Image (cartoon, rainbow, N blue to C red):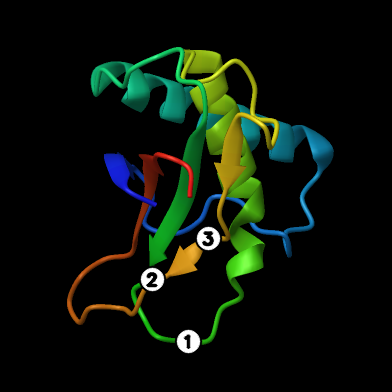
Amino acid sequence: MSVDIVLELPYEKPPLSMNDRLHWRKKAAITASIREVTHTLARQAKVPTGRGRVTVCLHYRPRDNRRRDADNLMPVLKAACDGLVDYGLTADDTPELMQKLMPVIHAAEKGRPGSLWLTIGDPQ
């Protein structure tokens, strides 16, 4: 994937996980917040709209190197992609228009807080 755009998300750790056992209302509120934050970041970065097809990947650099499963980040990726669609990046987040790559967990860097970011690029 050639990366065109990087959006730094304002989280030090994932706000949602596949392992969470949240009440549906709390989960819905967090999901809506991720969507809105992603929409706002895309607007502030002046990300081009109306793209035909894109590839999106979520990246996470935790504060420590404990073992983690990348698929636990999927709820964050889904909400972020919905926010990109709300913004107008593509018409929908169906596979024909948006290829969602498995999230990537990077090695921790000593002394740095955790961070999450999205990369948006051309399809593979």
Q: Residue at left 81%, top 44%? A: 23
Residue where numbered disc 1 is placed: 66
The secondary structure type at the circle numbered 2 is loop
Camera-near label (3 vs 2) is: 3
Residue where numbered disc 2 is placed: 62
Camera-near label (1 vs 3) is: 3
Characterize the local packing of mark 3: few (<14), some (14-19) or many (20 or more) Cα atoms within 10 angstroms: many
Asked if the residue under mark 1 is in contact with the one under mark 2, i.e. CB atoms within 8 Å, the reply is yes
Residue type at the position of mark 1: Arg
Q: On residue 4, which mark appears?
A: none
- Counting from the top left corner in percent of width and height, residue 95 is at 68, 37
Relative horizontal placement of residue 19, taking residue 5 as reference (left or right):
right
Front one among 101 and 11: 101
C-alpha separation, residue under disc 2 versus residue under disc 1? 9 Å
Q: On residue 103, which mark appears?
A: 3
The secondary structure type at the circle numbered 1 is loop
- Counting from the top left corner in percent of width and height, residue 19 is at 73, 65
Residue type at the position of mark 2: Pro
The secondary structure type at the circle numbered 3 is loop
